[in-house]
Image: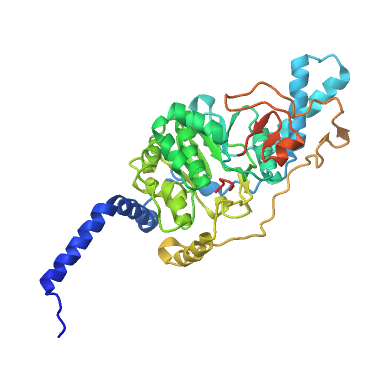
């Protein structure tokens, strides 16, 4: 004879199990609910896009065309000539004077060609002129695209400070400025989690701009410095953390830092664990519940989407995604299903968008103007001036550095210490 539990007892069992699960997993459930909330409500609420309101920009930078081609090596040589002549004061030498004038003209024409956005007075610029690059736990040869991307950013921002963060500098910085977080940072399973969390810490402490190493600047970013915070939109929901600009000690960045330990949990597999604990969905989820959400500028539009290998009005994104593992494919498929849901919109992509040709700019690395080449006495951009920050190590480039997985170029060396921590 079968004996079944009375309905009342079964109900008690269900309640007991539910209470037990909630007690033991309430923090995990809370974090998961925050992420789901972002997915559901993102497109149902207003977002403060660049160009909305009276901020001086067109919506989604629709009036900014794709960038023209620029020889960044030639631009660097021109800046070196100007710097050398001004330092030496060699204005009586006709050859040096002619060389100097052509370099100044080339720089001016290039900057004019790349100019965009409203003019902002320096006293109105809230975000400091700093660019942060982070690479964690890399032991392979540094890709040439990263070298070129970094060099382009330096040439377009000659007066900015560049701060490069490797494993040791990260540990030293966190121990000094955010000691409470060091144990959590070192406990992260994936290098990308360390890189993600580190970018929030350095942005909170110093402010400035964070760029993924696979983002090549194609125009200067000064126009955005009047905003307290700027980040590009992601798809189908949220914002990206591969490019972020912020003022120091910004409340939203503080919110991200304060919740890192709470969200340091395992979310079924590696891909969602990274995305939900420190990555784009972590940032997006907190953006969705931020009290100052309407003060956070979002660069929207498909023309500005940093997804895959693409050129936007401001960047070329080489699309490294080097932290993705096997489960990323599964979630890519799920993502395509989500994108088909009307509430999230659909994604269109033109992979054959031509780049805009600019005015006559030298096509070779040593040409300033047509028919005029840089003389052999021109100082190399690989000279070694004083470091611009305590996180910049001056060291000449050698073959050993490149083969050992370190990046040495221009006046600085980036120490790159398994998997590359690049979104």
User: Which residue is painted at 62% across and 46% down in the image?
Assistant: 214
Q: Left of 186 or right of it: where is 69?
A: right
User: Which residue is painted at 14% across and 80% down in the image?
Assistant: 3
What color scheme is it? rainbow
Residue 307 placed where, x, y %?
56, 54
| Residue 260: quarter of image | top left
User: Which residue is painted at 86% across and 33% down in the image?
Assistant: 373
Residue 341 placed where, x, y %?
43, 66
Question: Residue at the front extreme?
Answer: 1
Q: Left of 102 or right of it: where is 170?
A: left
Q: Is residue 80 above or below residue 328?
A: above
Residue 133 visible in this rendered orientation of the protein: yes
User: Which residue is painted at 46% across and 38% down in the image?
Assistant: 200
Question: Residue at the bottom extreme?
Answer: 1
| Residue 375: quarter of image | top right
Q: Nearer the viewer, residue 146 or 417?
A: 417
Q: How many marks?
A: 0
Residue 39 placed where, x, y %?
39, 57
Q: Left of 104 or right of it: where is 66?
A: left
Q: Is residue 23 above or below residue 198?
A: below
Residue 54 visible in this rendered orientation of the protein: no
Q: Is residue 361 above or below residue 390?
A: below
Image quadrant holding the N terminus, namely bottom left
Residue 203 placed where, x, y %?
48, 34
């Amino acid at each position: 004879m079968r004996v079944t539990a009375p309905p009342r007892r079964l109900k008690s069992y269900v309640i007991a199990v539910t209470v037990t699960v909630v007690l033991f997993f309430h923090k995990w459930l809370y974090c998961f609910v925050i992420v789901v909330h972002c997915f559901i409500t993102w497109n149902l609420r207003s977002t403060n896009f660049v160009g909305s309101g009276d901020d001086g920009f067109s919506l989604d930078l629709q009036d900014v065309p794709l960038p023209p081609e620029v020889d960044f090596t030639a631009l660097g040589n021109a800046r070196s000539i100007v710097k050398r002549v001004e330092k030496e004061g060699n204005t009586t030498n006709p050859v040096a004077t002619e060389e100097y004038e052509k370099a100044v003209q080339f720089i001016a024409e290039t900057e004019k060609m790349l100019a965009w956005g409203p003019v902002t007075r320096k006293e109105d610029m809230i975000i400091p002129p700093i660019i942060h690059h982070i690479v964690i736990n890399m032991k392979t040869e540094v890709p040439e695209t990263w070298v070129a991307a970094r060099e382009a950013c330096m040439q377009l921002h000659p007066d900015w400070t560049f701060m490069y963060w490797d494993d040791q500098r990260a540990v030293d910085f966190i121990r000094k400025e955010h000691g409470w977080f060091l144990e959590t940072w070192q406990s992260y399973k994936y290098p990308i989690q360390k890189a993600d969390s580190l970018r929030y810490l350095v942005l909170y402490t110093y402010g400035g701009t964070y760029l993924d190493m696979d983002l090549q600047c194609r125009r200067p970013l000064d126009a955005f410095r009047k905003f307290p915070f700027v980040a590009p939109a992601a798809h189908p929901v949220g914002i990206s953390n591969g490019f972020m600009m912020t003022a120091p000690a910004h409340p939203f960045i503080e919110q991200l830092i304060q919740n890192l330990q709470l969200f340091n949990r395992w979310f079924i597999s590696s891909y969602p664990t990274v995305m939900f604990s420190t990555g784009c969905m972590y940032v997006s989820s907190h953006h969705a519940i931020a009290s100052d959400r309407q003060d956070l500028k979002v660069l929207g539009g498909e023309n500005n989407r940093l997804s895959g290998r693409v050129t936007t009005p401001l960047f070329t994104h080489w699309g490294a995604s080097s932290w993705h593992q096997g489960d990323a494919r599964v979630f890519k498929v799920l993502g395509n299903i989500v994108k088909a849901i009307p509430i999230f919109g659909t994604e269109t992509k033109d992979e054959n968008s031509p780049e805009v040709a600019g005015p006559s700019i030298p096509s070779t690395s040593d040409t300033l103007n047509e028919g005029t080449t840089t003389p052999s006495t021109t100082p190399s951009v690989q000279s070694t001036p004083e470091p611009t920050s305590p996180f910049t190590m001056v060291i000449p480039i050698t073959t050993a550095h490149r083969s050992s997985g370190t990046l040495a170029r221009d006046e600085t060396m980036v120490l790159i210490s398994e998997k590359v921590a690049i979104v």
